[in-house]
Amino acid sequence: MSLCAECFNNGDHTGHDFNMFRSQAGGACDCGDGNVMRASGFCSRHRLKTGENVPSVPRDLLLMSEMVLPRFIITIIQYLRDGYTEPESAADRDLQKVLQQLEPHISFLEELTKMGGAMRTVLTKILTNQQTFKELSMGQEENVYAKRNYEKYLSALKSSGLVSVEEKGAGAGATDTPAGEDQEGLQGVGQRKRVKLSSSTKDPSIMDTLKHKCFLEELLFWTIKYEFPQKMVTFLLNMLPDQDYKITFTKTFVQHYAFIMKTLMKSHESDTMSNRIVHISVQLFSNEELARHVTEECQLLDIMVTVLLYMMETCLIKSELQGNKTDYTMLHRLQSYWIAGYKMS
Ligand SMILES: [Zn+2]
Ligand SMILES: [Zn+2]
């Protein structure tokens, strides 16, 4: 749970156990959300608001934003698609440069989130609308620039799935087929322990390549690809007071969870990146109801276990104790850890 300074100072926190720090990464204040905190801790402003009739904004006032913003957002996405290069493909890879050029655009979006609930509702509608995404994502026929960027986006999506170590190791002809679809590849000799675990996960789609249906999903995808640029994270988090947004964003985050971890493992700045990931997940999962909802509906636990397994797989070291048999040093270590833990308890 997190509170902004203003709400904290205007609330009664006598006897509460708290920790104060200044967040550099933006975020949403949980004050007023009954799912996160007891109403007795709400500040005076948020306590009054509940049940009170909030006047609605005249529609004409928002019309312009509703028309312009979808195009503004696709322009940002075009930049992101165009500017991205894979770490292994280019020597002069400079993602920071692309982000610097985009800085004013993303700052503008961030400014919009501070304008209040009405503007956040408009943004939420645009970010989550499937029709708008369909219409603008591919680009117009005659727009060569947009077409080329769309191709780039598709190929970036293609490599978003998790490929299990054995398949990669199988070498000859093994392409980026997502694991799970290729059951044969999992039956290699000496892999029994893993096979058992992997095949027990209900849904192979966890390892599958990503598919997007709205701007928000693609924006998060690029946010991950560019390793969580601060401005972008701030924008995405500032939108959280909108409840519809919060739900969709949380689901999108879970949908991309495996991909986030895959990118994190390849990152050269994994400390910074993991800090920002934690910052986001703390904001999302401090809402108990929402956390339970995504656990049940989006298989959050299955995803986490699968990803953990995948991460462990990549750092396994062949055991020298028993030659080339089934066991790995990592498993030995885990085992002795468990035994030690068992003895202590
Ligand atoms: Zn607040
Ligand atoms: Zn408040």
Image: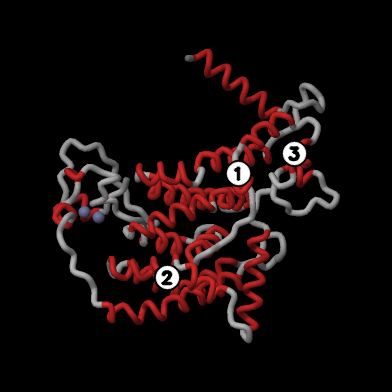
Q: CA distance from mark 2 to mark 1?
A: 30 Å
Q: Residue at x 29, y 51 (%)?
A: 30
Q: Residue at x 35, y 45 (%)?
A: 287
Q: Residue furthest top?
A: 343
Q: Which mark is residue 165?
A: none
Judge left or right: residue 265 versus residue 171. left
Which amino acid type is marked by label 2? Ile
Percent position (x, y) of residue 335? 62, 22
Which type of secondary structure does the marked residue at label 1 adopt?
Answer: loop
Percent position (x, y) of residue 73? 47, 73
Which amino acid type is marked by label 3? Leu
Which type of secondary structure does the marked residue at label 3 adopt?
Answer: helix
Q: Nearer the viewer, residue 167 or 224?
A: 167
Quickly name the residue at label 3: 186
Q: How packed is label 3: few (under 14 Cα within 10 Å), some, or many (20 or more)?
A: many
Which type of secondary structure does the marked residue at label 2 adopt?
Answer: helix
Quadrant that contains the N terminus? top left
Instruction: Write down the quadrant of residue 232 in the picture.
Output: bottom left
Is 173 rendered above or below residue 185? below
Q: CA distance from mark 1 to mark 3?
A: 15 Å
Q: Earlier in the sequence, mark 1 or mark 3?
A: 3
Quickly name the residue at label 2: 126
Q: Residue at x 17, y 57 (%)?
A: 49
Q: Nearer the viewer, residue 103 or 81?
A: 81
